[in-house]
Image (tube, coloured by chain):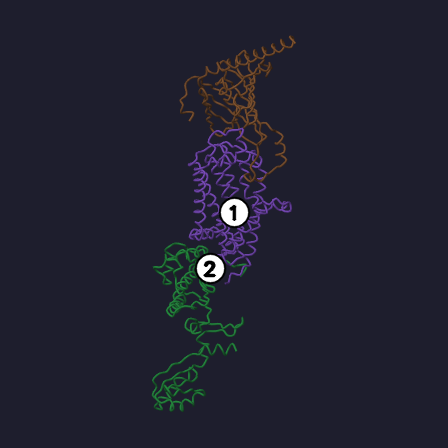
Amino acid sequence: MRKLTSLLLFSILSFASYAQDADALLSGIVLKMQKVKDYKVEALITSDIPMVKILPSKATIYFKQKDKIKIDAKGIAIVPKQGFNDISKLLADKNSYTAIYMMKETVNGIATELVSIFPKSDTSDLVLSKLWIDPVNDIVIKSQTTTRSSGTVTVEYKYGSQKSWGLPDQLIFTVDVKKFKIPKGVATDLNKKSDKKENEKEQKQGKITIDLTSYVINKGIKDEVFK
Amino acid sequence: MLLKSTWNEFIKIAAKPRSYLGLVAITVLVAVILFALKADGMSFISFVTASFEQTLSFEGNIMNGNLVAFIVLQMLVIHIPLLVALVTGDLVSGEAAMGTIRMLLTKPISRRTMLLSKFLAGAVYTLLIVIWLGILAVIVGKLMFGVGDIMVLNSDGLVIIKEMDVNWRYVGAFGVAFLALLTVSSLSIMLSCFSENSIGPIVTTMAIIILFTIIGTLDVTIFDPIKPFLFTTHMIAWRSFFEDPLPWDVIKESSIILLVHNVIFISIALFQFNKKDIKS
Amino acid sequence: MSTHREAILRQIGCIIEKPDFYKYLSAEKNLEIFARISGASTAKYDIHAMLEFVGLKGRERDKVSGFSHGMKQRLGIAQTLIHDPELIILDEPTTGLDPQGIIDVRNLILQLKNEKNKTVLLSSHQLSEIEIIANRMVIINKGQTVTEGEVSKLLNEQELVVRMEVQDSGKALRILNGWSDKVKENKDDNTLEFATSREALPSIIKSLTENDVLIYGVESKRKLEDYFIRIIN
């Protein structure tokens, strides 16, 4: 009985310590994020989405604390609806979520700690967010966010020159595309190739790669830019 | 002589009020479409992109002049044949009804030259209609909505074409659209050779277009073998210029089928016109 | 005809049936159109000169839709002349015209013949018109040539029908019976009608005056109509 009690006690303790770990990991990230008041960056967006043909397009992305973001595309750019600044938005309000430490995992050769985040509100669009965190540099290496509206979006972050600011050089989004349907009657063209369609049905995930260069950090951005 | 006679045909076309009906109608239609898109263009786009927008967001000036021109073309290419036939369907039968064909053929000009000059004049009128549509759709569209990449929905998905890659596609698209309308012009002139009144060929042309279009859209297997040979099937061939990669084989096939239709229509017209009794 | 169609048509100007024009175009535009495909000058000066010749000066820019039948007929003749052909073929040019129109067109045709030295081939059922206008005539019945020759000669071979107004028709009748076998007397207005040859007419008149018959009027008619009826029968 005592044995059982001590085991139970141990597990409660260890859970508490894990929770502590998760919060510590996240606050490290938040601290780093808060150092960046604003930034401007040039993006090259390369999309590989089934049923969408688009050449890489250029855009300028503006960000300002705490959740202002603006994508200024030269032409038409396709970006994921979710996963851009959701993490910083989410982490900004510490009381809105519960974070649980899950385990250690190696992602792309980097030792990471996996933290799961659940929203406290039942009505939140967010269902679950998983963050793979590099504890050494306090940066997110990978995230996976599941929302009611958009399914699951996975983002891989690659860092380079702006690692110290916690800003990535490359983002690779993987999005669910199973819901894509072409409205019937809208498209009427000549070369309807049904076999081609079938092949594309099998590919259910789209990949959008955003290469980020020429960061301009903390130089001040006027609010008008975001209007 | 062919050119002189063609010039005569222009004078006649230019003097008829109905010739301007087409240009005015296109102007009004395009103005209405441009106004509607200016007022509520985004809802039109979201209707097209609805299924994508749950997970993706489209950034940039989507409702730009290039897309507007595409929408205008899409909406009007089906209606312009009527405007073309209104003029071309009258070219022979109108003169037969008036009696002037008798006067013309007492002059030192062969029937073949006379008829070919009418085909030429019909072709130039059709070209003018297409150019006017192009000016309104592309140039006015760009002035009103600015330039940008064009997003087109095809049956196998969305295609986004870079702005710098768009203009030559429009040249090609308008070229194929012209070829399609030229076929309508040739058809109506051919029918015009069989008629003594001007309303008959116009109505018959439209009836044929409507019939062929219905056959083309019906999902009935019995019609499948003839569908590729209906000229109406190829009236939307201009859209192929907004696919990626460009389906050259489809464009080539459509162009050839449309050209063959023109040759057949002109040949039948020549045969009929040569044996036509011009006396009233 | 089929092999040299255009070369032949270049020498011919014609109106078949009735002159039809582009009603929505002006007289000068109509002429310009026909001039252009005839290989003739489309210069305004030439077009206007032609319109003046047919008496349409001042109406050059008016739309044909407002033209009377006579004006259209004259424009039709202008159209036949526009490329200066040798032969002009007119198909019943005076049909449906008012009396003034008939005179205008008839004068125009005479002008073509006399001033412009054109050969005019005229088809008509108006025999009196042919009598006035034509030098030669061909009578065609059911596609067959019935007779052919100079109008004056053909008509001179025929008897004249003479209508005479006299003081005393009874007395005149007795004298005339010696000259002609079919004399009709109308006692109400003292007139007589009889057929005779052209050559005999002066002698008949002389004989009447010698017998103290007072003559108030003599009217002689060449009976082309009778001739026509007789010939085709």
Say which label, 1 or 2, has the lower sequence index: 2
Say whether residue A80 is left or right of residue C129: right
- Element at label 1: helix
- Element at label 2: helix
Q: Is residue C41 above or below residue A96?
A: below
Q: Residue at x 54, y 31 (%)?
A: B52
Total number of numbered labels? 2
Give neighbour class at mark 2: few <14, some 14-19, many 20+ (Cα, 10 Å). some
Q: Is residue A105 above or below residue B105?
A: above
Tag 2 subunit: B
- Quarter of the rendering containing residue A201: top right
Q: Is residue C100 above or below residue C191?
A: above
Q: Amino acid at mark 2?
A: Met
Say whether residue C102 is left or right of residue B270: left
* 3D distance between C-alphas at marks 1 and 2: 25 Å
Q: Nearer the viewer, residue B24 or C12?
A: B24
Shade of chain B as shown in the rendered figure: purple
Q: Is residue C87 above or below residue B57?
A: below
Q: Which chain is brown?
A: A
Q: Where's residue B201, x and y in %?
A: 52, 54
Tag 1 subunit: B
Q: Where's residue A159, x and y in %?
A: 53, 16
Question: Which residue lies most toward the front here?
Answer: A1
Q: Nearer the viewer, residue B157 or B185?
A: B157
Query: Quick check: marks 1 and 2 in contact, CB under 8 Å?
Result: no
Shade of chain C as shown in the rendered figure: green
Q: Mark 2 highlights which residue?
A: B98
Q: Where's residue A47, x and y in %?
A: 55, 27
Q: Mark 1 highlights which residue?
A: B182
Q: Nearer the viewer, residue A50 or A191?
A: A50
Q: Where's residue B78, x and y in %?
A: 52, 45
Q: Amino acid at mark 1?
A: Leu
